[in-house]
Image (cartoon, rainbow, N blue to C red):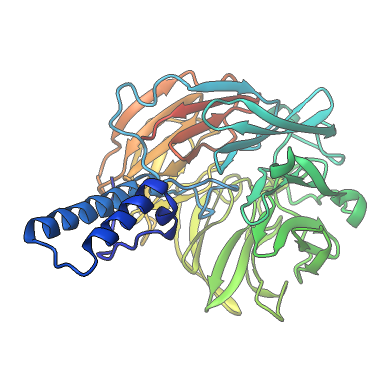
Amino acid sequence: MPDVVCSATVKLPTHIEEEPAYSEWMATANGELKGRRLMAPARGLLVAFFLLIATWLVLPARPALAADWPCWRGPAHNDTTPEVSGWPRTGWPGDPAWTKDVGEGASSPIVAEGRVYVMGWQGGSDSVFGLDAKTGQELWRQSYKCPEYGRFHTGDEGAYHGVLPTPSYDAATGYLYSLSVDGDLCCWDTRSGGKRVWRMNLYDTYKVPQRPNTGGELRDYGYTSAPLVLGDWLIVEVGATEGNLMAFNKRTGARQWVSQCKDPAGHTGGPAPITVNGISCVAVLTIRELVIVRTDRGHEGETACAYDWLQQFAANVPSPTVEGDEVLLTSGLNISRTVCIRMALGGATEVWESRAFSRACSPVVSRGCVYLAYGPLKCLDLATGETKWTGSSFGDDGSCLATGDGKLIVYGNRKLALVDIADSAAVYRELALKPGVGSGRCWPHPVLADGRLCVKDDMGKLYCFAVGP
């Protein structure tokens, strides 16, 4: 478990004085002790009592490490979490606490405030579920008509189907935002049984055309990119001719600004926040390039810098990974490499290039290394891009997340593995392996939140393992 730093000063919460037993005790103590000097034994007992109270208040610091997973790639938008893996635990991760069939699609689950939110497609409709994270009990479900593929879909239909974008949760409002493969952007009130707050169809509203051919055969998978909650905005990669990114008022759906970049949408899982030269921005990989879009007041939507990245078949699936002012990109086909790029206003500089790559897994950065779960799990040095080790094999549908106790949870090829990355070891060290998790492809990313590990396959089988305290 990582070190927990606690302040030396423990402030008693005011609400504790409202507890009857405590209030009565304080009133009695004040009445009896008023105007009298405490004897040494009494002082010692009182000090011991307050030390006991202070210790009781500090002990919950371990559960406080629990973190929600409210959006695509988690709380930091990079598949890392301060949560611990649950290792060592006999037979990690054990049998599922619960399972549920939620419908087809590569959309990943998310976890927020004790609830699992997940989407799936079945019988001509998308469904959005709110589930109890501990039991899997269905708390609410909302459904709407939607095709299995986007209206301009072409190519690779056998490799994907159903819902692709991952929903996003906003703790400030309790709203959940979902996007269908056919452009249905919806806002749901999770605190009112999932009641729909607002809706629009991006294809219909902004006349979004089919993606162009970028070499090879034409590919268009419909909408794949998760909405991004940023302050009062919901930022969406629309891919319209008037702008690639659009920001909407998260409460009403009213459009706030449009990006200067007018590229068609890429096929990644979604944009990520980044700070460049002290300026708040968003990194998005369009069909043609990595674009850093400003979000600071007065410059909303302006392009801060860009980096060319054009893959054949328009099929760049891995999302950009932000690490400080640097972005990691990876891709297969005609590119087949991983790069680290330093972003600055007006320009981008390539820091290093590696011939190790992924066609599906987004790069995960932890403890000075970069991890790619595509075929064999690969570990690259973050500073140089040098390959440090490879190990096992997770197929072409793998993904991974890094935990706060120096472990990597890897899901792919229908197996779930726990890998030790606490030290910069020169070899792959597998701690646990659970095969046979799922019956379909493992496109959805694993999720770790509040002691629960959730994984889902593209056929809609959702597994929840209790791995935390």
Tell me: 401 left or right of 270.
left
Side of 274 where 193 appears, left or right: right
* Residue 221 appears in the rendering: no
The x, y position of residue 109, in whole percent, is 60, 37
In the rendered image, which quarter contains the N terminus? top left
Q: Is residue 26 left or right of residue 336?
A: left
Residue 402, horizontal then vertical, whole percent: 41, 45
Which residue is at the front of the view, 67 or 107?
A: 67
In the image, residue 267 lies at what x, y percent? 69, 47
Viewport quadrant of the C terminus: top left
Q: How many marks?
A: 0
The answer to which of 252 and 409 lies nearer the viewer is 252
Taking the image as shown, residue 232 lies to the left or right of residue 48, namely right
Residue found at x 23% / y 56%: 50
The residue sitting at 25% across, 47% down in the picture is 423
Q: Viewer-proximal residue, 185 or 62?
A: 62
User: Which residue is the extreme one toward the left?
Assistant: 40
Examine the rendering and report whether any part of residue 430 can be seen: yes
Locate residue 11, reporting x and y percent: 34, 63
Residue name at image x 22 percent, y 62 percent: 33
- 15 vs 71, nearest the viewer: 15
Determine which quarter of the picture holds residue 137.
top right
Residue drawn at x 30%, y 54% as measured from the top left = 28
